[in-house]
Image (spheres, rainbow, N blue to C red):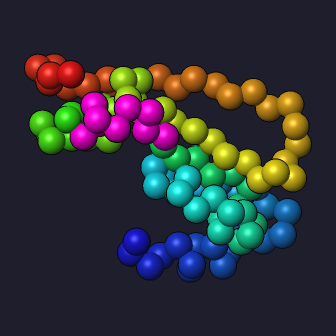
Amino acid sequence: MNGTVDGLLSHITPGARTAIVVPTASFLPDAFFKEGVGMVSGAQIFNAGLALDLLSQGARAHHLYGCCARKINLLPLTARAGLKPRRSQAAGPLPGMKF
C-alpha cells in the first residue's frame, strides 16, 4: 500500500456510488464497505500452482485471467439482491509459457 487510500476514502459523500477496483482489494472488502464503498472488485485465483508457474515465467496479472484467475465483484450483504455475476474477457497466458 502506498498510503493513498485513506485520503481517497475521505472524499466519499453520503449517498455516492463508489467502487474500489484493484486486484488485491478483495482481501479486505469489509474494511472498504465500512468506509462507504458500495462495491469492491478484485481477483480470485482458482489455480495457484499454475498462477505461480506463469508468474515465474514473466506473466503479468492480466495474463492469469481465464486460465487460473477470475475477476470478481463483491457487494456488502446489505446490497440489493438479484444481481447476477458476469464473466469477464481474459487475456490468457503469454505465448510460449508452459502450463
Please state if 84 lies on the left or on the right of 61 as rendered: right
Measuring from the top left, give residue 10's x and y in whole percent: 66, 79
Front residue of 4 and 74: 74
Measuring from the top left, give residue 39's x and y in whole percent: 69, 51
Front residue of 97 and 52: 52
Please state if 93 lies on the left or on the right of 38 as rendered: left
Q: Residue at x 20, y 35 (%)?
A: 53
Q: Quadrant of residue 92?
A: top left
Please state if 68 lies on the left or on the right of 86 as rendered: left
Where 81 sits versus 92, above or below?
below
For the question of whether residue 51 can be seen, the reply is: yes
Measuring from the top left, give residue 6's x and y in whole percent: 57, 78
Residue 42 among those drawn in magenta: no
Please state if 22 lies on the left or on the right of 1 as rendered: right
Where 1 sits versus 68, above or below?
below
Q: Quadrant of residue 61?
A: top left
Q: Which residues are magenta?
A: 44-52
